[in-house]
Amino acid sequence: MPSYHYTTPGPRFSFGQPWTPAVKRLIIINVIAFLAQIVFAQRLPLQLLGLQLPEMFLYSRIWQPFTYLFLHAGFWHLAFNMFALWMFGCEVELTLGARRFYLYYFITGVGAGLCVALVGRLAGEHSLTIGASGAIFGVLMAYGILFAEKKITLLVFFVLPVTMKAKMMVLLFGIFEFLAGVGNAFGRVSHLAHLSGLVIGYLFFLIGWPELAQRLTFWNDIKMWWFSRRVRKFEPEEDIDQILEKISRQGIGSLSRREREILAQESKRRRGE
């Protein structure tokens, strides 16, 4: 089993992550490629550099699964991908190391692109696939595994701050991409590529570092949530005072089932049972 360097994360996710070498190079290359798309819009052969099946096999364009990662459909497509790469990729690179980060990035990116192209052909679709989204979602999966319990704060719709564990972020992204992709897997936004990046990223860790992949389990969180609903932890003095006050005002018959349970539990506790 290969070794890895684990860097203990801070308590919260924040802006101002240090630029790491691999992430910096990938962002620079993506920006240069996007500028080339603008400057040479009429002459840049997207059909040669984007990912297409069966053309990749028919004309031996073996570079397409790699070059498609550096092409984007517009400024915001590029901006969102590069922002996510910077926000999450730097800590992942610090943990895995630059070489392993490159390997992981291209495995998830190439794998996601091939999944989209192959499933598209099987479904009768013939489209050109471009963008780093598959690799970016692979990076999100790596972050969720390496920093599973770390609490991060995301701005939903850039306004509403929501704090959650990193592994819950990955779960929510996965659920969203699955639901959004149902019936629209090959739209302008390739939800299939996003979902493929997540799945391939998880398989990468499951094969290479199964003990890390086990961090992305939600069973304990589900049990704690369920337990907290079924057996609510209460403050005896506060709850008992409220229940006794209710009895004095409305009589014991006014108590709810839950209040009767609390009263019985407190009675047992005081008797030492």
Image: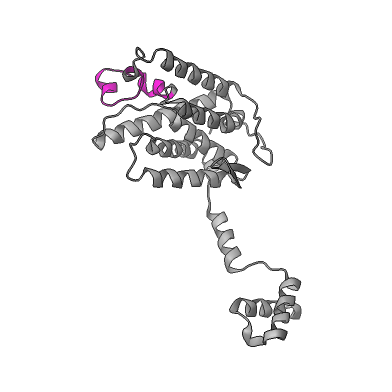
| Residue closest to the eye, 6 or 222 | 222
Q: Residue at x 35, y 28 (%)?
A: 129
Residue 215 visible, this orientation: no
Q: Position of residue 242 (x, y in %)?
A: 72, 76
Q: Is residue 53 magenta?
A: yes
Magenta extent: 48-69
109 vs 27, left or right, is: left
Q: Residue at x 34, y 24 (%)?
A: 51
Q: Position of residue 142 (x, y in %)?
A: 53, 36
Q: Position of residue 125 (x, y in %)?
A: 26, 33
Q: Residue at x 35, y 22 (%)?
A: 50
Q: Is residue 12 magenta?
A: no
265 vs 50, left or right, is: right
Q: Residue at x 45, y 31 (%)?
A: 133
Tally of marks: 0
Q: Write down the quadrant of residue 144 in the picture.
A: top right
Q: Is residue 81 above or below residue 166?
A: above
Q: Position of residue 105 (x, y in %)?
A: 48, 28
